């Protein structure tokens, strides 16, 4: 569900009558379950886009500014645009609204062999129809981990129209432990691969939890790496130059005093703001929120 607040933090009763909305996607008379939201965006006209996944596949739902479904969006008749991506055990994890009004989703998709999951992106036109200029019929699949699984964790659209993503790769090594890699990659506006932007490997688990694009074209990545036993975690932050190489002024840096970074944002002054928590993996929540700002 989603909610909208007034400037003073109270619920906005003009949105869905009480400030809160719980919605479920469906096609025809078939309702979907296991909804997961990857993100939301507000259009210039005040309409709201929700990007996510459910048992029906990857979807984008559009709401009017008062929270009612925009029935003119998509082809389902319920204000929802779908792809045919199979995501029974995966989900959409990245969502962005492009300057041209198109919506972009990224995540993981199961293949016929449930052990081999691939990264996937899908793009919709401003009216909710599949964007035929992207991938194949609006959907593009990528196979980064040749001997395991991979999924897109987050994405951002650059001013050039190219797409930058963070990818989790899980490689199953013969006779050895599972190796998890955090990959950074850039794609052209049509969904074709452009260039790799570096790989960071860890024998435990890596979660890339945020990407932000600076006004100068540089890209900031943040995430959290866990130990093999997941008994402790450590966050990292790095910046990539326009050409895709690591920025020597801001290389891959471990942030030991913030065990988990959740999000990153950049401002017009080129300063970088990150937010996270001090809990270790496996606890039920952060005991405190940590907010930190970095200079350029």
Image (cartoon, helix red, strand yellow):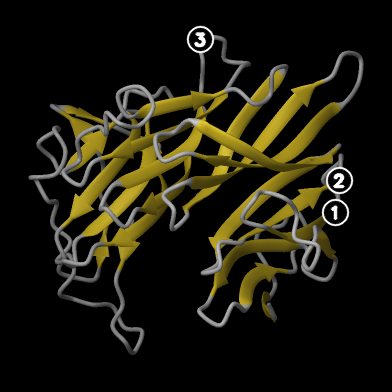
Asked if residue 252 is positioned above or below residue 30 in the image, the reply reads: below
Q: Position of residue 180 (x, y in %)?
A: 77, 35
Q: Are marks 1 and 2 in contact (CB under 8 Å)?
A: yes
- Say whether disc 1 or disc 2 marks the residue closer to the N-terminus: 2
Q: Position of residue 10 (x, y in %)?
A: 31, 83
Q: Position of residue 72 (x, y in %)?
A: 8, 45
Q: Is residue 231 left or right of residue 165?
A: right
Dot 2 falls on a residue whose secondary structure is loop
Residue at the spot 29% in from the left edge and 43% down from the top edge: 60
How dense is the environment of label 1, judged by Cα within 10 Å: few (below 14), some, or many (20 and up)?
A: some
- Say whether disc 3 or disc 1 marks the residue closer to the N-terminus: 3
Real-space CA distance between mark 3 and mark 2, rounded to the nearest whole angstrom? 31 Å
Asked if residue 180 is positioned above or below residue 173 in the image, the reply reads: below
Residue 204, image quadrant: top right
Q: Nearer the viewer, mark 3 or mark 1?
A: 3
How dense is the environment of label 3, judged by Cα within 10 Å: few (below 14), some, or many (20 and up)?
A: few
Residue underneath mark 3: 112
Residue underneath mark 2: 227
- Say whether disc 3 or disc 2 marks the residue closer to the N-terminus: 3
Real-space CA distance between mark 1 and mark 2, rounded to the nearest whole angstrom? 6 Å
Residue 288, image quadrant: bottom right
Asked if residue 249 is positioned above or below residue 38 in the image, the reply reads: below
**Residue 232: mark:** 1
Dot 1 falls on a residue whose secondary structure is loop
Asked if residue 258 is positioned above or below residue 231 in the image, the reply reads: below
The answer to whether residue 51 is seen in the rendering is yes
């Amino acid at each position: 569900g989603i909610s909208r607040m007034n400037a003073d933090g109270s619920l906005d009763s003009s949105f869905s009558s009480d400030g809160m909305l719980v919605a479920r996607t469906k096609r025809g008379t078939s309702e979907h379950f296991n909804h997961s939201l990857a993100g939301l965006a507000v259009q210039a006209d005040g309409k709201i886009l929700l990007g996510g996944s459910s048992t029906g596949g990857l979807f984008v739902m559009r709401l009017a500014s008062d929270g009612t479904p925009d029935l003119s969006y998509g082809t389902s008749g319920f204000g929802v645009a779908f792809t045919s991506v199979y995501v029974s055990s995966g989900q959409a994890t990245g969502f962005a609204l492009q300057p041209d009004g198109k919506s972009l989703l990224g995540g993981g998709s199961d293949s016929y062999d449930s052990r081999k999951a691939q990264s996937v992106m899908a793009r919709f036109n401003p009216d909710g129809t599949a964007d035929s200029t992207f991938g194949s019929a609006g959907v593009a699949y990528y196979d980064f981990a040749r001997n395991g699984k991979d999924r897109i964790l987050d994405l951002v659209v650059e001013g050039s129209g190219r797409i930058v993503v963070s990818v989790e790769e899980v490689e199953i090594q013969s006779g050895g432990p599972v190796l998890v890699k955090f990959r950074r990659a850039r794609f052209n506006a049509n969904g074709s691969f452009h260039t790799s932007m570096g790989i960071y490997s860890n024998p435990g688990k890596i979660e890339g939890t945020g990407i932000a694009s600076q006004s100068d074209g540089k890209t900031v990545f943040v995430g959290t790496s866990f130990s093999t036993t997941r008994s402790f975690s450590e966050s990292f932050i790095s910046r990539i130059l326009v050409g895709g190489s690591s920025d020597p002024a801001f290389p891959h840096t471990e942030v030991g005093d913030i065990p988990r970074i959740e999000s990153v944002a950049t401002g017009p002054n080129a300063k970088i703001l990150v937010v996270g928590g001090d809990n270790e993996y496996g606890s039920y929540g952060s005991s405190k929120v940590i907010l930190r700002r970095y200079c350029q």
